[in-house]
Image: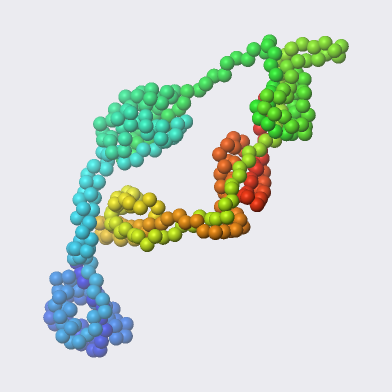
Amino acid sequence: MKNSCKITFEGLNINHLLSLLSKQGIPLYEAVRQGKKCTIEVPSSRSKQTIAILQKWCYNIIGIEFFGIPKLVKLAKKHIVLPIVCLLLVLVLAFSSQICLKIEVSGDFDRQTVCEALAASGVTVGSNLHKINISVLQNRLANELGSMYAIVRRSGSVLYVNAVAKKEISPPIDMSVRRDIVATRSGVVTGVFCEQGTSVVKVGDYVNIGDVLIEGRRVFNDGTGEEVYALGQVTLRICSVGFAQFDGTKTVTVETGRQLKATGVVLFGKQYVKPCVFEMYTVSTVVTHLFPLNLEICTNIYRETALQKVPATINECLDELKQTALDEAMSHCDFVVKDTLYETKNNGVQVTLYGEIRIN
């Protein structure tokens, strides 16, 4: 690592000055001239002597920049967190290959469920990977989840978990008993396919939950009939409705004027910094890269915010009202949405989501 100091200055008779520095035995790593301005690079150990000569000969010093160890020492004085960062870096490099820093989940179970099952088995982020018995963990995890099986593997400091749920086998169908196909939802009939039985609805009919769609009865030409297991498919156009009430105001976010500054370190893409005490806030982050250690120091400035209601027209709140109504409609929507209809009223916005389901 080259410990040097780069000095930028301006003045006249620069060639004479460079010759003077050479006679003083000061090595010049680099010298770049631009008119009256010149930038030279000298050993850090000779920087004070060089600066003294420049000041003695009345040169205007524009900038001084250190490289190597002196720069790190200067940064350490400016950022008191640097010794802590260096200590953390040493610890991370020493133990990162042994400590679980991340858990990747795949398969039929959500991440939270799998992590809870892992925690019940004694494994979390921060656990020592070399102390984990993979075979024992796989069996315990499968039992905790009630899964068919679980596969666990580790790579570096990451633990990969794939759990597969047990497959449910449908019970056999008794085709000798009567069965009606009934509506499980309310909607408009858009299609009917009857394979066995008697259809009692047609396209365009509106049906309610529990209405018979295909009757489990076969009728012969002579008027007689027999009970059968109804087979077929009826398509219904259904909807989900959401409404957002308008009260003559809109909610805006304003800054209260209070702010908090916190400095921390970034390791493996994650910030380690003092959390904000504000309930609502915005944050701006400044990251400083420390070379050659490739460390990152982050400074977060938290600004407290609050919600405030102000008078507004319905047109000013239209986008927000539409989104609120849409969220309500989607919260109890269990079908694929094909059409969306918005209706603006005096007291709010209503949205209707349309889709289709097939009843077998």
Q: How is the image coloured?
A: rainbow
- Which quadrant of the rendered structure holds the N terminus? bottom left
Q: Horizontal placement of 302 versus 130: left or right?
A: right
Q: Horizontal placement of 182 versus 50: left or right?
A: right
- Which quadrant of the rendered structure holds the C terminus? top right
Which quadrant holds residue 120? Answer: top left
Q: Residue at x 20, y 76 (%)?
A: 28
Q: Horizontal placement of 62 versus 114: left or right?
A: left
Which quadrant holds residue 163? Answer: top left
Q: Residue at x 70, y 19 (%)?
A: 180
Q: How many marks?
A: 0
Where is residue 160? Give x, y as percent.
38, 35
Is 51 situated above or below 299? below
Is 306 situated above or below 16? above
* Most foreground residue, 15 or 333: 333
Where is residue 94? Give x, y as percent.
22, 44
Tell me if residue 282 can be seen.
Answer: no
Where is residue 130? Give x, y as percent.
26, 33
Q: Residue at x 61, y 36 (%)?
A: 335
* Most foreground residue, 1 or 289: 289
Q: What is the residue that sits farthest to the bottom in this orientation?
A: 13
* Most foreground residue, 352 or 12: 352
Q: Residue at x 26, y 38 (%)?
A: 98
* Most foreground residue, 172 or 37: 172
Tell me if residue 126 can be seen.
Answer: yes
Where is residue 264? Give x, y as percent.
28, 54
